[in-house]
Image (spheres, rainbow, N blue to C red):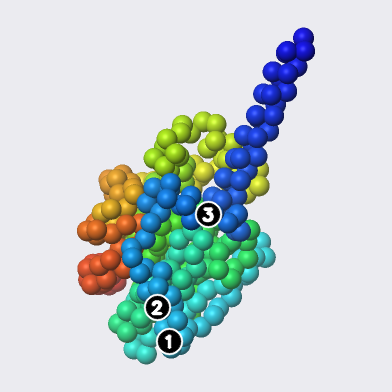
Amino acid sequence: MTAVFIVLGVLAALLVLLFAVCGVIFKQLVWQNPFPTPKWFAKFIAGAGAPDNYAHDMETARKALDALPIETVWLHAPDGAKLCGHVLVPKKPNGKLVLACHGARSSGLGEFCQSAPFYYENGYTLVMPDHRGCGESDGKYMGYGTHESKDTFLWVNYSKARFPDCAIFLLGVSMGGATVLMMSNHADDPAIHGIIADCPYTSAWDEFSYQIHTSFHLPDFPVLHICDLYCRIFCGYRFRDASPLDAVRCAKKPVLFIHGEKDDYVPTFMQGTLYDACPTKKERLVVPGAVHARSYYTAPALYQKTITEFMEQYAGEKV
């Protein structure tokens, strides 16, 4: 009998330990302020690396933004949350507005600091929201496109009211790419002319599952299921709810899909899955040599040419 109690005690301790470990993983995945991660641990995460000098170059680009006339704007969501965004109005507007959505744990200015001068100099009005749980906006956690897609429609309304003559294009990178694709099935507004999705995942569940398998060679069960349970309890959504793939199957606007050829964080094959599912007019660009969310950094001229042609093609169309 004593042996049974010992075994049950050990099993109970292991179960508590498992849920505690999953709690830490959940916090790292979703919560605004994760635990500090040792640099050596990042080596285990597939695709987590960046090009040489990337951090330095982006910091230089971020500082250079101070020379541009960037405005800080605040919106109030229906639930009372304060949402911060930054707006860059060109001297000679070209009639096109880019509503740019950043990736996880980034910000509008942080994500688009390198590309912002291109939009400004070429006449694009640029609106860069900070998603909840990121940047200066309210929020304790990220939704991987669930609440971000809803909030971004508030920025669409803001853009329409302030710049009524502009053709709006939704642009997103990584989680931002997922966000704009999750808007695609509700993008009935004629002010929205197209969507540019840079390195989005098919769903948050798929992305986390891929990392568990690729980086740690573990099965989904039980870790991913427990983390998903935490997400449902504390954040009110499931990882499978964050599904650009489900949304893009009913897309209503033209979509340009962009992905890095060497993206091993959100693997490039996900672009093919999303592209094939999209029923509207669509284009795709795979940037040679680019890793995750570094397509603009790796090939700015190619990136600029591709998105310019896409926006020129659809800016004047009623779609």
- Amino acid at pointer 3: Pro
- Amino acid at pointer 2: Ala
Q: Are marks 3 and 2 in contact (CB under 8 Å)?
A: no
Q: Secondary structure at mark 2?
A: helix
Please name whichever residue, 258 or 41, is drawn nearer the observer in this view of the structure.
Answer: 41
* Residue 32, label in figure: none
- Amino acid at pointer 1: Leu
138 over 60 or under it: above or below: above
* Residue 61, label in figure: 2
Residue 132 visible:
yes
Quadrant in which the C terminus is drawn: bottom left
Please name whichever residue, 269 or 177, is drawn nearer the observer in this view of the structure.
Answer: 269
Q: Are marks 1 and 3 in contact (CB under 8 Å)?
A: no
Q: Where residue 317 sits: x, y (%)?
A: 27, 68
Quadrant in which the N terminus is drawn: top right
Q: Is residue 24 left or right of residue 153?
A: right
Q: Which residue is mark 3?
A: 38
Distance Cα–Cα, label 1 vs label 2 = 11 Å
Q: Which residue is mark 1?
A: 68
Task: Tell me which numbered mark, 1 or 2, is placed earlier along the sequence.
Answer: 2
Q: Where residue 312 sits: x, y (%)?
A: 25, 72
Task: Tell me which numbered mark, 1 or 3, is placed earlier along the sequence.
Answer: 3
Q: Is residue 209 left or right of residue 274?
A: right
